[in-house]
Image: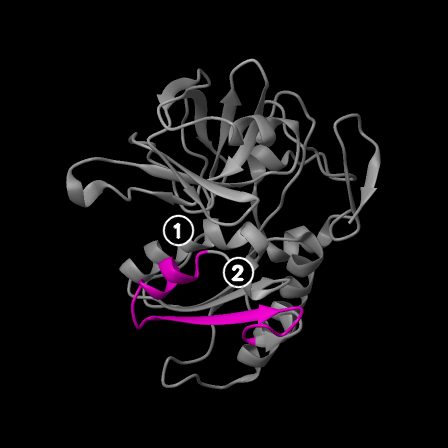
Amino acid sequence: MDVKNFDTRPEVLPIKKIVKETDTIKTFVFEYDLGSKPGQFVMLWIPDVDEKPFSIAYDGGGAEAGAREFWLTIAKVGPATEALFELKEGDLVGVRGPFGTSYEWKKGEHLALLAGGYGAAPLYGVARAAVADGCKVEFIVGARSADLLLYEERISELGSDVKYHAATDDGSKGHKGYNTEVLEEILARDDDDGAGPIDRVFACGPEVMMKKAAELARTKDLPSQLALERYMKCGFGVCGQCCVDDSGVCVCKEGTVFDGERALSFSEFGKYHRDSVGRKVEW
């Protein structure tokens, strides 16, 4: 999981397109050759407001038309994203990156991708790249209800090598309950319609969910990779804001994608994180 070389100066870009995913989630499309790997992130500067890290949902979507583009799928959760949601197509923002590590797999493997909430967006980019490498993918998405399931149509368009599994808290679509219960069922199978057993488990979403995914992978002696989220200011390991307790590991530089066993070794993993002033916040 090598970190890509980067320029720390922001690239000022116009918003090419804005897609409303749900009442609180939008996808912002930019025409730019970012050159990221699946799982990496960028620092997005909203002028006169703030700069925040966001996972890259997809990089290269416009290549077939002779243009490069990347997508950021963002939830409105605070002052910075509230300001971002007020912007229109054509408005300018600053982008630094890509930063961080990426998900890794081998050609032809059978992957289980576990997404919680808007974690479906970055894992979509993983699935698309993995299918191009001849992989089979079990794409498991969880949400509170059917109307909050993200990227369903885009995932279904990836072809027969991707099987979509939905889980909702209220049972309005797919499995009623946690998406980790679907993952557990899939891992219990010796074979899945001829695709063979799972080779790796990837997860992106709520940390308690990812901890369970890593523990399930461990029971099957499978490698797992998880995208940790921490408060970040710089994006390249200078400020130390995203350091993990008892380790000194900067999530922005050594992550955000970590080996599951390494994540399980962190004392705070699945228990708490720290806010902008260092106070513990329980998950």
Can see residue 220? Answer: no
From the image, tell me which residue sits under label 2. 149
> In the image, residue 242 lies at what x, y percent?
68, 32
As drawn, the label of residue 125 is 1
Dot 2: within a 10 Å radius of its alpha carbon, few (fewer than 14), some, or many (20 or more) residues? many
Instruction: Tell me which segment is drawn in magenta.
Output: 151-174
**Image height check: is 250 above or below 48?**
below
* Mark in the foreground, 1 or 2: 2
Magenta-span inclusion, residue 154: yes
Secondary structure, mark 1, is: helix
User: Which is nearer the N-term, disc 1 or disc 2?
Assistant: 1
Magenta-span inclusion, residue 88: no
Determine the residue positioned at 30% across, 36% down.
69
Of 176 and 258, the residue lying toward us: 176
> In the image, residue 8 lies at what x, y percent?
46, 18
Q: Amino acid at mark 1?
A: Gly
